[in-house]
Image: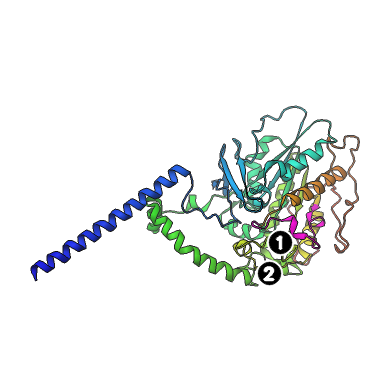
Amino acid sequence: MFRAGLTFIRRFLFAAVLLVLLVCGAEVAVRVYEASTGDSVCSQRDAVCSDPSQLTIPSWSFYQELKPLAEAQVECRDSNSLVEIKTNSLGLRGPELAVPKPAKVYRIVILGDETLFAPETPDGDHFCTILQDRLQQTANINIEVVNAAIPGHCPLTEFLLFKQRIIGLQPDLVLLHFDWSDVADDRQIRRLAHCNDAGVPLSCPHVKLTRTMKGAPHEIWRKQFRLFDWGLTAVSAEWKQKIARQTAISRETDTNPYAFLRDERPERNLSFRRSVGPVADLSGFCRSVNIPFALLTSPKPWQVSEKCSRGQGVRVAAGVAQDALYSNRAPFDVLARFADRAGIPFIDGSMVITPGRDAELNFLRFAPRWSVAGHLRLAELTARFLHERISGPWNPSSLQQNEQPITEVRPAATEIQQVGGQRIRPRRVLPDSDGQ
């Protein structure tokens, strides 16, 4: 009996030691892999709606930013190629920028989120490069278009980014791309923002920088042990997919980030009204420092066709059902009306990214972003708008803005007209709940 007990204890200890050695070996293997490849075992490559470049880091000022002077390779599954992404010392995609701005350089800054950051699109085919080339053809000085888009940003954080960092670039023109995911992003981020008494944002620190580790020991374990972190990530992946599928088919605006697009009166949606507020703040700030400002928007794939961006898991990851179609024109009309009341020139990308034959060619299949064709169409629309409506070195002989809208006006746009660009006193403007 005694001998049998010792045998059991010996075998148990041997198994325990072997298990510990296996765990330690696996931990070492994971750390060696991460050190040699530079990749994290917990990076979710299938999360196409987030930042596939893995270049974003938490920020104390505007929620998150890009690593400065960093490089990354992003796999574009549509073209079966790797796209090189480089950031400059300011943490913006693109080459280094001269500060102060050189003489005879007209600098255009474009703010936006992951749609405009476009990690799957090479620099040569990007919206910013095409826009720069089109404007340069008729300009008498050098045109420089700066991509100031940050994945996960919304007008609130873009306003902070501009005030605290971009203003030092001395831009001559500012464009802001309003993405329809900004409504959900604003709802997620706004609770972290610090605002003044007038509601104007002052800073927005990332939650990872402000929360305490007390009461969350698993977070400490995840940082100390990579194998534990990998295990938790793998276990939670399926649960997250289940929640995403439930969210995609929900019609509740609190759970489905795009449910408000079905509303014929989206101006009544509080989240939408809050999300466009910083656009008016940024417009007023630019006006106060004599910088022209314009607003650009474009439809999401599921606002154009149920066939757009139908790669496996793409729509579900974005909170959209696989066959969903939000064809409602009301959100675009309300945004145009908001821009009109605020005196902001408005560029409606839905005039060129339209439903119809081969509409899906304007978007990537495996990411909810523009394809090369989409970048080309929107850049040409923007260049045409600037030629017709904004005075600049591309039309030096014309110092007066055209008061008529650009030519491709959608007949279904009801009475909403493109804004005439008139100058008004700076004021904070929000869409009225009665739609006026």
Name the residue tied to disc 1. Answer: 308
Query: SS at mark 2?
Result: loop
The extreme top residue here reads 103
Q: Residue at x 85, y 35 (%)?
A: 138
Name the residue tied to disc 2. Answer: 323
Q: Quadrant of residue 143?
A: top right
The amino acid pointed to by label 1 is: Cys
Horizontal arrangement in the rendering, residue 238 relative to residue 168 (left or right)? left
Residue 122 at x, y percent in the picture: 67, 44
Residue 217 at x, y percent in the picture: 37, 57
Q: Quadrant of residue 316?
A: bottom right
Query: Which quadrant of the rendered structure holds the C terminus?
Result: bottom right
264 is higher (above) or lower (below) than 353: below
81 is higher (above) or lower (below) than 186: above
Horizontal arrangement in the rendering, residue 331 relative to residue 6 (left or right)? right
The crowd level at tag 2 (other Cα within 10 Å; few <14, some 14-19, many 20+) is: few
Query: What whole-number distance in Å separates the C-alpha atoms at marks 1 and 2?
Result: 9 Å
Boundaries of the magenta span: 347-367
